[in-house]
Each structure stands twice: as structure tokens, then as C-alpha cells.
Image (cartoon, grey):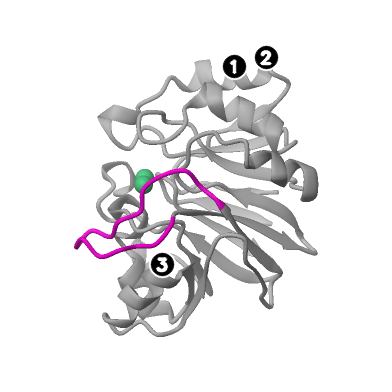
Amino acid sequence: MNITYYGHSCFGVEVNGKHLLFDPFITPNELAKHIDVNSVKADYILVSHGHQDHIADLVSIAKRTNAKVICSFEISVWLSKQGITNTHPMNIGGKWKFDFGNVKCVIAIHSAGLPDGSDGGMPMGFVVESTDGNFYYAGDTALTYDMKLIGDYRNVDFAFLPIGDNFTMGMDNAIIAAGFIKCRNIIGMHYDTFGLIKIDHELAKKKFTNAGNTLTLFDIGETKKY
Ligand code: NI
Ligand code: MN
């Protein structure tokens, strides 16, 4: 799987030839000014929750690519009012088989209102299972014991976890989360974008290494093979 980082919590993941895009927030991100949003590919856009820093470029990319948007039922209703009808509404605990593989929606402990005050439903994480491999995209979340369910019943090769603290769990709780999900290969997200979530990269990597895990921090625009 090729993984490309577009900054904050926005990643493109190529699964079985399909381009999955997670939480598009590119054009308002001062750190991602070198990313051409019009070149970002998407066959599917997975949206963890309705906060601005996860959906800023959702409508424009969905319109340009006609990608199917996988999101909460409430966000799909909100999108339909803006002319985006190629959606697949889901909710926590639900799983669906897509042409690239399965998506299971899992609990995220966070808030989820949309920028205009609309109800965005519940925040979610996603477990993607495919013949290319399995991964967990946590979205914005606190550390929660529910993550143990992923470790007990799913087989995750790598996981995208928030590590920026303040709005989500920070690096120390993310290390505990890696234990809960039984996954040692962690990709960091939701850090550095704003002053409140700036982190020390070397300290974070060292802490993960000391706990027997690997923390990978992508450069924005970088693509790596997994
Ligand atoms: Ni959020
Ligand atoms: Mn956020």
C-alpha cells in the first residue's frame, strides 16, 4: 500500500488500486501550502467526524473526483444539501464490504459538530481490512478501553493515531493505545498544525521506541510504501 501524507490527519492510502483519502484538510493548513489540492486523488473519502480540520476540502474534492464519501449518516445528510450525493452513510459498530476491502466503524471519544452548527453525528475511527493488509485510522480520539476490542478481534498491520495532545490523546496515551490494539507500527497524525498541538518529534519517536514500537512521522507530501 502506498501512503501519502497531506498534513494534519489527511492521508491518501492506495488499497487494491483504489485511492482512499482520509479527513481532507489541506488548503487552510499553513504547513501544507506546497500541496496542490487539485492533484489529490480519491476514489473514496473517509471522514472521521465533522470538525473543520477534517473536512475543509471535503466538498471541493468530492465534487472534483466524484469519490464516494464514507461518513456518519448525519454528515451524509449535510453533504446532500451541498449537492454531494455519492455517499455511503455508516455508524459505529457497522461494517461494509467495498470493492477495495472492508471498512468497520469503531468508537472514537471526541466531539463532532459540523462547522455551521449542524449535527455531525458521532465521531468514528475506521478499521480497513483488505487483501493488501489491514490498518486502523483512529480519527480524533482519547485513549479508550474500547481499543482493546480492535486488538482482540482484528489484526492490524499499522495504525494512524493522533499524538498531538490537547484536542486528542497525546504521545504517551498513543503508546498505551498501540498496546491495546496490539500493533507496533504507528503513524502519527494530528500534531504540529496549530500551536496547541506542536510536539517534539525526536522525543515522540524515542518514547515509542523505548516502548517497543515504531513511530513514523511523514513529511507533508511524502509517500511511503507499506
Ligand atoms: Ni476534531
Ligand atoms: Mn481535529
Q: Which residue is mark 3?
A: 39
Q: Amino acid at mark 2?
A: Asn
Q: Secondary structure under badge 1? A: helix
Q: CA distance from mark 3 to mark 2?
A: 38 Å
Residue at the (28%, 60%) spot, across then down: 114
The residue to which callout 1 is attached is 207
Residue 143 drawn above or below residue 66: above
User: Which residue does the numbered mark 2 point to in the structure image?
Assistant: 210
Q: Main secondary structure of the magenta part?
A: loop
Q: Measured from the top left, where is residue 109 in percent x and y?
A: 47, 43
Residue contact at pointers 1 and 2, CB within 8 angstroms = yes
Nearest-to-viewer mark from 3 and 1? 1
How many angstroms separate mark 3 from mark 1 (CA)? 35 Å
Report the residue at 34% width, 60% height from top: 55
The image shows residue 161 at horizontal and vertical percentages of 55, 39
The x, y position of residue 173, in whole percent, is 54, 26
Q: Is residue 109 magenta?
A: yes
Q: Residues within 10 Å of mark 3 (few under 14, many from 20)?
A: few
Q: Which residues are magenta?
A: 107-122
Tag 1: amino acid: Lys
Dot 1 beta carbon under 8 Å from ligand 2 = no
